[in-house]
Amino acid sequence: MISLVTGIVRSISSDKTVIEVGGVGLSLSITNQTSSQLHLGASAQLFTALVVREDSLTLFGFLDDQSRNTFELLQTVSGIGPKVALAVMGSHSAESLAKAIAQEDIKAIEKVPGIGRKGAQRLILELKGKLTDFGSAGTSHVHQPVWREQLMSALISLGYSSKESDGAINEVLADYSEQGIDPSSLELSELLKRVLQSGRRS
């Protein structure tokens, strides 16, 4: 079983790369996101999964162990093979997929090419509870409401770190709690404005 490849990048396309290891070029199937992180002629380390078929041996490469493990777990779902599993990993990080499954967010999963609504429902049904060990510590155990996820994304796009975003949101939520206001009843723009006004950047 080949589980890790370290070598020089000899060729890159949106879905494949060739890594030279000890004078041998290994072809790996990758996602577009992985492709964008590789540089021709530079050293690279990819975590790999070897898929064996009667007529082929295919290596799939990932930037981290967490993504590789998620890719392998996806293939335990009925009807999902390595190509569709790779498409899922091309649309989601291991953490965002874990959250989508925990929240039963069908729309976030069915947008993946080759999945569809029924495939998304089956994926949620078969993987619910199995992805809680992935993602950064503790995050995938928490069923965060959609509005909070959107607010976090907005803050991160404005330059906040995940930790700063979390702290700023918690501070505003504490204020809302004292006032008896339900944040889910407010517009995202109003929540974002309030968080930015708090000025908290730890």
Image: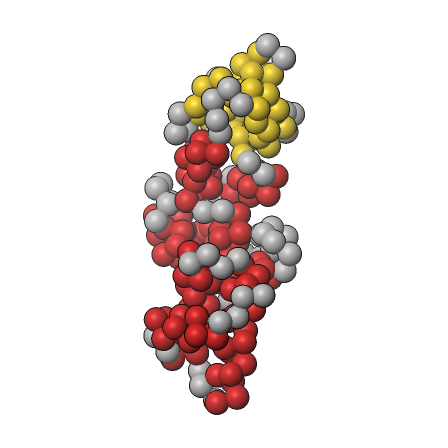
Between 101 and 9, the one lying in front of the other is: 9
The percent position of residue 34, horizontal first and vertical second, equals 47, 34
Between 72 and 12, the one lying in front of the other is: 12
Q: Is residue 160 above or below residue 183?
A: above
Between 32 and 195, the one lying in front of the other is: 195
The percent position of residue 83, horizontal first and vertical second, equals 43, 33
Between 74 and 36, the one lying in front of the other is: 36
In the picture, which quadrant includes the N terminus?
Answer: top right
Q: Is residue 86 left or right of residue 46?
A: left
In the picture, which quadrant includes the C terminus?
Answer: bottom right
Please say whether residue 142 is visible from this viewpoint: no
Which residue is the extreme one toward the top? 23
| Residue visible at 59% across and 10% down in the picture | 23
Give residue 132's quadrant in the image: bottom right
The percent position of residue 160, horizontal first and vertical second, equals 49, 59
Q: Is residue 20 above or below residue 77?
A: above
Q: Is residue 83 above or below residue 138?
A: above
| Residue visible at 57% across and 11% down in the picture | 24
Please say whether residue 144 is visible from this viewpoint: yes
Colour theme: secondary structure
Q: Is residue 2 left or right of residue 104?
A: right
Q: How many marks?
A: 0
Which residue is the extreme one toward the bottom? 179
| Residue visible at 49% across and 29% down in the picture | 38
| Residue visible at 54% across and 76% down in the picture | 171
Give residue 187's quadrant in the image: bottom left
The percent position of residue 117, horizontal first and vertical second, equals 35, 52
Q: Is residue 42 left or right of residue 117?
A: right
